[in-house]
Image (cartoon, helix red, strand yellow):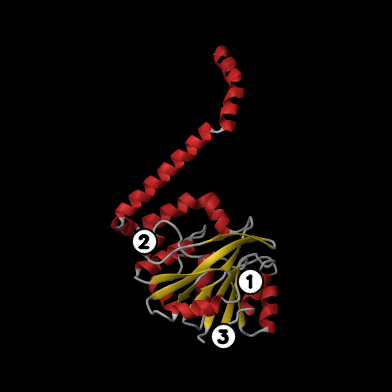
Amino acid sequence: MHLVSIIIPCYNHAKFLPDALQSVIEQDCENWECIVVNDGSTDNTEEIACLWSNKDTRFKYFYKDNGGLSSARNFGIAKSKSEYILTLDSDDKFDKTFISKALKVINDDPKIGIVSCWGKRFVGNTYYDIFKPNGKNIEDFLFQNAAIGNSMFRKKCWIEAGGYDENMKKGYEDWEFYLRISKLGWNTVIIQEPLFFYRQHKTSLRTEALNKFDKEIRLYIFTKHKDLYIKYFDQTVENLLTIIDLNRRNELKRINSIDFKLGNFILRPFRFIKNSIK
């Protein structure tokens, strides 16, 4: 079976790292190397990573100055020996069958550049909803990430696309990376099983991106790939109108809600007094 290079960037997530590494060592495919990139952590990431690399030489540890997730991934991939890359964030996990199943898929068709899967969100030991990305080609990636952020892809794709964008330090760098790969004509396959486990917590970059920087990052992506959105102008307009309609419906629901009407009823006397004083 082909060698797979697993790249795990870690920045101050030492407490989660053992779970990620355990999910690697439990893979039913044993022909892998796992490159842990310490992206300038100030916790005991180095101690944890070296403990594992001393137990199993398939684990390799590297330190670099902090540069963000994209920089750490690019650093690790540059050190890798395989033609197949699998990224894994240090706070997440894969099912033990993911690598073997992904290899089977990617070897079936030379046009497949990315293999992803369904995922489950978890907090502690409790697992919640299954999320089901449905990416296949460029059109699926235009307005959202249609694959799991941690997926298997050909190293050739990484080279052709120019690696992860190291200017993107606030999130969605995986979406933009897949967009560039798809732009080059590569296809994506989603394994329709929940084989990836996403840990939800306050310091997750994905959670922060969604809560704080969504508009800013989307503007960056749309501007960077302006030619693409001009090419798919009809789909872009339809997406924009759908968002406007959704926002309008949500606003109407808010206005018609009992809480909103009750609030207006309670405040009405105070508004009357305020207006009378003027």
- In this image, 207 relative to 167: left or right? right
Q: Which residue is mark 1?
A: 20
Q: Which is more N-terminal, label 1 or label 3? A: 1
- In this image, 244 relative to 59: left or right? left
Q: Residues within 10 Å of mark 3 (few under 14, many from 20)?
A: some
Image quadrant where one finds the C terminus: top right
Tell which of 51 and 186 is nearer to you: 186
Q: Residues within 10 Å of mark 1 (few under 14, many from 20)?
A: some
Percent from the top left, x then y, of residue 249?
Answer: 46, 39
- Can residue 78 be seen here? The reply is no
Q: Which mark is residue 139?
A: 2
Tell which of 63 and 122 is nearer to you: 122
Q: Which residue appears at 38% of the width and 74% of the height? A: 160
Asked if the residue at tag 2 contacts the one at tag 1, i.e. Cβ–Cβ closer than 8 Å, the answer is no
The amino acid sitting under disc 2 is Glu
- The relative height of residue 265 versus residue 213 in the rendered view (above or below) is above
Percent from the top left, x then y, of residue 236?
Answer: 34, 52
- The relative height of residue 261 versus residue 104 in the rendered view (above or below) is above
- In this image, 225 relative to 88: left or right? left
The amino acid sitting under disc 1 is Ala
Q: Which residue is mark 3?
A: 31
Q: Which is more N-terminal, label 2 or label 1? A: 1
